[in-house]
Image (cartoon, helix red, strand yellow):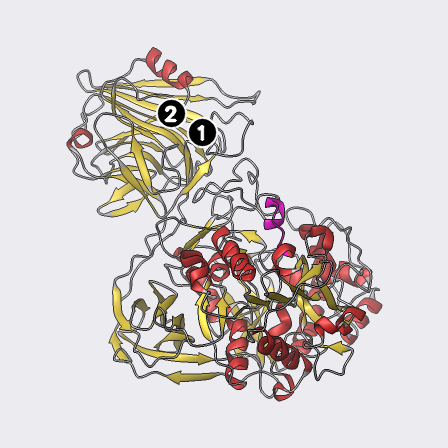
């Protein structure tokens, strides 16, 4: 079967800048590339849904290209460049503490230079037993290592006598059932031949490729320049992972240093520094974690482990197929590279911004690329057992969804477990992303295209800013605009993004939150690597274990979890906060008395109905999918107006309530009152204002009845007032 | 309900026709607690071998499909195709009813 996939080096590009595209094709000699502008998405039939318009842009890369298949080098490890000190090891000791998660699941390299019959290494054999590997031979300690137990492991090799000791000692704080030390002596052990391969931690070599990836944590890997005696090995095991370099160290890697980076620091005098590949998880608890702190910055020596996975992926590293320079005449909006080969297709969307300092529109669409990244290759929607339950309907999938099954190396999203059961914490856009497209499930990017269709239909001048820009540039990314409005689901927010929106509002900016479940999870961008975010689910143990003791971001050190848990609930900035989700049916909002307050008169101008949004292409209403509620106790401003509330949500919404709030779920026919989406408005002290709809499904109603409906009217009313420079005034007494 | 391995811990009684009729009338939307529990059983079976819908024409036609019994999951299109999600949902309900009770649903 033919398949074609691609990705870009960035999501956001200004006029005059370049964007590079990477393409792989399987089963066909060529592929067709077309750069298009996207208006709408391939969703539901007209007349109620927007028409899907794809405009071909004049671009030199359009046309047939010779195709090539590229693999994705999945699996993380650390690599130290080839150095004579590590290439010509004779008598030596290899040691580390390990916490294997999949022992017995194929051979796994802990450290060394093994490449076929060459090199030297300390491995777990395919049975999960510790093995010294030298000259292609395995010298195996018979005991199997137990999963998820810390174990000091070492091999001491005496080249003069041709003997070796392989040693393991399980040692975990607070366990009553740890196994003691075990060792095995071996004779006729060959002297390692010199190896020109780089030294690796958590992988072996197959030529330049990395194989035999280790699954689990590795702490304080070391190479010592002599063969330690059994007594010395015992001392080293008991010494623990912290402390200065070993006196005999050729290399002594302290993984508690430079946790936010790819750097692997060597404490020895040899400067054998390395770097991690494919972002293994850092800031994870080590063997000496003493239950006192959760913040690795306070006790870095207790977070000196790295958790490697054979399915970690940061960058697919495909060569650039072609580069596009954005011409001056291109409007700031949404575009895509459309790839076709045989009957297969793939989309690589990107967003064009105006040249720096040349913004002209009064408003900007703040595209939630941070959320797209957190959900990139959302494998659980295909593979997960619970997806259908909380969606309340049979799952609908297409060929592109199944690319994740055909090509497991595409990796996972932050919702999915690794192969070893630990939750994926990092998610990257530097790989093909199957759910970032204007087709398939109407959710995230695909649904956000409803806003583009609406803006185009209403001929509202707008420009684009992405979350990536907001994070990188702060308020400067949006300060040219009077009003910014979100997509349907801006769930993932970095501190920098939230601070930028708040500063914008304090300076009189206007903010329209036109979605649901927004500003929910604190998210971190990597300090140096582009296109990758980190999410840790602290406070919501239903997604993973170990969320508490590893509850600080490795990228930034910040407390992780929901913004509510962190102490900055979404209600503070949006006036509403997430309640629950349900995807089986949507409903409308009933206006409250507060909607008739003169402060809100501009919002409902021309709207006669008391119930609004009781229609829409997304399950029949503007209120639904994921919904947020006004709650002063959680930080909604006291002067905020709750203008309308949705009602009569189905009991599928009740299922998720306990996951998100402390409400007691009731499986009643009518959803309990707290399960509702609220439309909220409030002014800010600098002359700004906020309008929130608290529902993902809002955008699905804009195009109803040929765009002639009260959701369109309300959204336009607010946008037109929000781009008017006349300051909003705080109400009396606020 | 189901245990951790996904095995049923209660037996679905083929006499619960009223629940099937309720679902037939309204496949999406508010359901009685008893029907919701039955649906929870149907919707939490192991993913291997589970029915799903293949989007055969963008948002206008869906074809009944089944996941492979092993991973990585592969789809098998078994048909029929539907032009209404409600009809597709009802068809899957009937198939799952038969799986759970061992009997065909005596209503259409």
**Residue that numbered label 1 is attached to:** A145
Residue B70 visible in the current orientation: no
**Disc 1, SS:** loop
A526 and A210: which one is in front? A526
**Among the two numbered marks 1 and 2 on one chain, the one whose residue lies closer to the N terminus:** 1
The answer to whether mark 1 and mark 2 are in CB contact below 8 A is yes
Going by the image, does B104 lie left or right of A45? right
Q: CA distance from mark 1 to mark 2?
A: 10 Å
Residue A566 in magenta? Answer: yes
Q: Residue at 77%, 69% (x, y): give it.
A: A594
* CA neighbours of label 2 inside 10 A, class few (<14), some (14 to 19), many (20+): many
Residue A201 numbered tag: none
Q: Quadrant of residue B66?
A: bottom right
Residue A443 appears at what percent x and percent y? Answer: 55, 69
Tags 1 and 2 both on a single chain = yes
Of labels 1 and 2, the one closer to you:
2
Q: Residue at 63%, 72% (x, y): give it.
A: A698
Residue A695 visible in the current orientation: yes
Residue A491 appears at what percent x and percent y? Answer: 56, 59
Q: Residue at 23%, 23% (x, y): give it.
A: A189
Q: Quadrant of residue A639?
A: bottom right
A604 and A315: which one is in front? A604
Q: Chain of mark 1?
A: A
**Residue that numbered label 2 is attached to:** A153
Residue A395 appears at what percent x and percent y? Answer: 60, 67
Q: Which residues are magenta?
A: A563-570
Vertical arrangement, residue A418 with respect to residue A187, above or below? below
């Amino acid at each position: 079967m033919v398949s074609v996939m691609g990705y870009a080096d960035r999501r956001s590009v200004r006029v005059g800048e370049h964007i590079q595209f990477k393409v792989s094709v399987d089963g066909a000699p060529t592929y067709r590339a077309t750069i298009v502008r996207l208006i709408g998405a391939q969703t539901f039939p007209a007349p109620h849904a927007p028409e899907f318009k794809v405009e071909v842009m004049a671009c030199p890369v359009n046309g047939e290209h010779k195709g090539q298949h590229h693999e994705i080098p999945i699996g993380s490890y650390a690599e130290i460049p080839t150095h004579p000190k590590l290439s010509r090891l004779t008598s030596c000791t290899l040691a580390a503490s390990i916490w294997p998660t999949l022992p017995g699941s194929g051979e796994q390299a802990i450290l060394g230079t093994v490449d076929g019959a060459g090199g030297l290494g300390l491995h777990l054999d395919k049975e999960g037993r510790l093995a010294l590997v030298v000259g292609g031979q395995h010298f195996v300690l018979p005991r199997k290592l137990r999963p998820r137990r810390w174990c000091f492991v070492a091999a001491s090799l005496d080249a003069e006598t041709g003997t070796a000791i392989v040693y393991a000692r399980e040692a975990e704080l607070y366990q009553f059932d740890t196994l003691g030390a075990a060792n095995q002596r071996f004779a006729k052990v060959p002297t390692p031949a010199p190896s020109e391969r780089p030294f690796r931690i958590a992988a072996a070599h197959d030529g330049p490729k990395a194989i035999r990836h280790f699954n689990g944590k590795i702490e304080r890997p070391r190479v010592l320049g002599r063969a330690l005696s059994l007594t010395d090995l015992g001392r080293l095991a008991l010494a623990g992972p912290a402390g200065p370099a070993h006196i005999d160290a050729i290399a002594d890697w302290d993984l508690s240093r430079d946790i936010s980076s790819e750097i692997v620091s060597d404490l020895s005098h040899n400067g054998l520094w390395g770097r991690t590949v494919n972002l293994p998880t850092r800031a994870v608890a080590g063997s000496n974690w003493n239950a006192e702190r959760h913040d690795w910055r306070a006790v870095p020596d207790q977070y000196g482990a790295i958790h490697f996975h054979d399915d970690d992926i940061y960058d697919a590293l495909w060569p650039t197929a072609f580069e596009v320079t954005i011409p001056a005449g291109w409007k700031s909006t949404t575009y895509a590279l459309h790839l076709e080969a045989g009957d297969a297709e793939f989309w690589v969307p990107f967003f064009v911004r105006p040249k720096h300092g040349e913004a002209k529109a009064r408003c900007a669409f703040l595209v939630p690329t941070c959320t797209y990244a957190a959900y990139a290759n959302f494998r659980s929607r295909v593979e997960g057992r619970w997806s259908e339950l909380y969606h309340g309907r049979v799952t609908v999938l297409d060929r592109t969804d199944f690319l994740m099954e055909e090509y497991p190396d595409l990796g996972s999203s932050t919702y999915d477990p690794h192969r070893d059961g630990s939750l994926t914490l990092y998610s990257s856009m530097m790989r093909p992303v199957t759910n970032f497209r204007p087709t398939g499930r109407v959710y995230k990017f695909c649904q956000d295209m409803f806003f583009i269709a609406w803006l185009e239909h209403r001929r509202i001048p707008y420009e684009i800013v992405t979350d990536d820009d907001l994070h990188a540039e702060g308020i400067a990314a949006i300060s040219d605009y009077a009003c910014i409005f979100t997509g349907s689901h801006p769930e993932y927010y970095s501190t920098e993004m939230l601070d930028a929106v708040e500063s914008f509002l304090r300076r009189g900016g206007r903010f329209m939150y036109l979605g649901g479940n927004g500003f929910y999870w604190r998210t971190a961008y990597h300090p140096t690597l582009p296109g990758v975010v980190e999410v840790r689910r602290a406070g919501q143990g239903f997604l993973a274990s170990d969320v508490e003791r590893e509850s600080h971001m490795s990228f930034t050190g910040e407390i992780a979890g929901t913004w509510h848990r962190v102490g900055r609930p979404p209600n503070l900035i949006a006036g509403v906060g997430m309640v629950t989700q349900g995807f089986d049916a949507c409903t409308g909002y009933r206006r409250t008395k507060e909607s008739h307050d003169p402060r809100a008169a501009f919002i409902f101008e021309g709207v006669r109905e008391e119930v609004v949004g009781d229609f829409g292409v997304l399950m029949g209403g503007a209120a639904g999918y994921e919904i947020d509620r006004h709650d002063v106790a959680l930080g909604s401003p006291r002067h905020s107006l709750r203008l309308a509330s949705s009602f009569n949500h189905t009991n599928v919404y009740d299922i998720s309530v306990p996951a998100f709030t402390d409400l007691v779920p009731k499986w009643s026919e009518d959803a309990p009152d707290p399960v509702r989406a609220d439309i909220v408005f409030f002014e800010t002290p600098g002359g700004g204002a906020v309008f929130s709809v608290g529902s993902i499904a809002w955008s699905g109603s804009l195009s109803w009845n040929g765009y002639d409906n009260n959701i369109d009217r309300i959204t336009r009313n607010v946008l037109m007032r929000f781009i008017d420079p006349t300051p909003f005034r705080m109400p009396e007494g606020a | 309900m189901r245990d951790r391995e996904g095995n049923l811990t209660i037996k679905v009684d083929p006499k619960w026709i009223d629940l099937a009729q309720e679902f037939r009338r309204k496949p999406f939307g508010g359901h009685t607690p008893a029907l919701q529990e039955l649906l929870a059983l149907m919707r939490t079976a192991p993913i291997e071998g589970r029915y799903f819908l293949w989007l055969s024409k963008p948002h206008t036609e869906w074809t009944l499909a089944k996941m492979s019994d092993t991973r990585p999951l592969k789809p098998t299109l078994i048909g029929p195709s539907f032009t209404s999600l409600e009809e597709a949902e009802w068809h899957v309900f009937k198939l799952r009813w038969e799986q759970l009770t061992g009997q065909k649903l005596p209503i259409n």
